[in-house]
Image (cartoon, grey):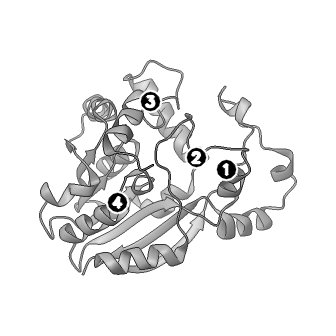
Amino acid sequence: MSKSIQEVEKFWDNRPCNIRHSSHDVGTKQYFDEVDSRRYLVEPHILNFAEFEKYRGLRVLELGCGIGTDAIRFAKAGAFYSGIELSSQSLSIAKKRFEIYGLEGQLTLGNVETCSEIFSKGEFDLIYSFGVLHHTPSINNALRSIAKVANKSTELKIMVYAANSWKSAMIDAGLDQPEAQFGCPIANTYTKEEISQLFANSGLAINSIYQDHVFPYVIEDYLNYKYTIHPYFELMPPAVFAAMKAKFGWHCLIRGHGL
C-alpha cells in the first residue's frame, strides 16, 4: 500500500534525521559541533560530493535540509543559502543552528514535490539534495518540480539510495534497515539505469552517476559513540574496500544540470 506525504512528515517529526548524532543537549553549540563532526567522520564522501567551498557567493537551494548539517557548511563557506524541509521539527532545529552560529539562510517549510511553487526558474546556481528524494511518495513529481526551478546553468547534486548495494542486500536478508529508526514509511532504492530514465523523463540532464559509502562500524558501539570497525572490513585492504564502495555503495551520487 502506498504511503502518504503526511506519514513521511510524521515519521521525521518523531525523530529528525541524525538528531542522535550527539550526546549533548539538542540546540547547543556543543551539540551542533558534535553532529557535524560525526556526520563527516562516518560519511566523508559528502565533502567531495558537496564541495561546500565551491559555492562561495553563489545561490544554493537544498531540498530536505533536515537539522541543517550540510546547510551550515554551505552558509559558512559563503553561499547564499536557501533550504526547504518537510518536517517542522527538523526545520526548527535547523533554524536554531543558524541562530547559534550567527549565519544567514532562508529556511522554509515545504515539500520537495512542489518546490517549484516556492522558487522560480533559474533562481539558483546549485540545487542540492542528499538522501531525501528516495523518501518522498513520488520521485517523479519531485524531479519534475526541480526541472521547473533549474535551468541550463543550474548545477544539480542529488543522492538517492542504490539498489545494487551491500546495504540493500543486507536489508533484503533481514539483517539491516534503511534508517537508524525502525519503520521508515518510504525508502526506495534505484539502479543507475532507473535514475537515468527518471531524469530524462523529467527534463533533467545527468553528467555523472557513481556509488559510494559502505558503513563499516559495529552498530552497538557506534550508538555509544565508539567507532569499532567490523573485523571483516578491518581485514580488508584499503584498495579492496574502496573498490567495494564504488561497486556496492549505498549512496548513488548524481551530478547533473537543468535544461
- How many other residues sit within 10 Å of disc 1, few (<14), some (14-19) or many (≥20)? few
| Disc 3, SS | loop
Residue in the image at 28% along x and 30% along y: 92
Q: Earlier in the sequence, mark 1 or mark 3?
A: 3
Residue shown at the point (52%, 78%) measured from the top left: 193
Give the alpha-carbon distance from disc 1 to disc 2, as whole Å.
Answer: 7 Å
Q: Which mark is residue 41?
A: none
Give me the C-alpha separation between circle 4 and circle 2: 21 Å
Q: Residue at horizontal 14%, vertical 69%?
A: 121
Q: Which sits earlier in the primary sequence, circle 1 or circle 2?
A: 1
Q: Marks 1 and 2: CB-CB under 8 Å?
A: yes
| Residue 171 numbered tag | 1
Q: Which residue is mark 3?
A: 15
Q: Which residue is mark 4?
A: 128
77 relative to 68, above or below: below
Mark 2 residue crowding within 10 angstroms, few (<14) / some (14–19) / many (20+): some
In contact (CB < 8 Å): disc 1 and disc 3: no
* For marks 4 and 2 on the same chain, the one whose residue lies earlier in the sequence: 4
Which one is nearer the viewer's eye here, 105 or 63?
Answer: 63
Q: Secondary structure at mark 4?
A: strand
Q: Is residue 145 left or right of residue 178?
A: left
The residue mark sitting in front, 4 or 1, is 1
Q: Residue at x 47, y 78 (%)?
A: 208
* Among numbered discs 4 and 1, the one appearing first in the sequence: 4
Q: Earlier in the sequence, mark 3 or mark 2?
A: 3
Q: CA distance from mark 1 to mark 3?
A: 21 Å
Query: Residues under labels 3 and 4: Cα distance?
Result: 22 Å
Residue topped by disc 2 = 178
Q: Earlier in the sequence, mark 3 or mark 4?
A: 3
Kind of residue sitting beneath label 4:
Tyr
Mark 3: give few (<14), some (14-19) or many (20+) Cα within 10 Å: some
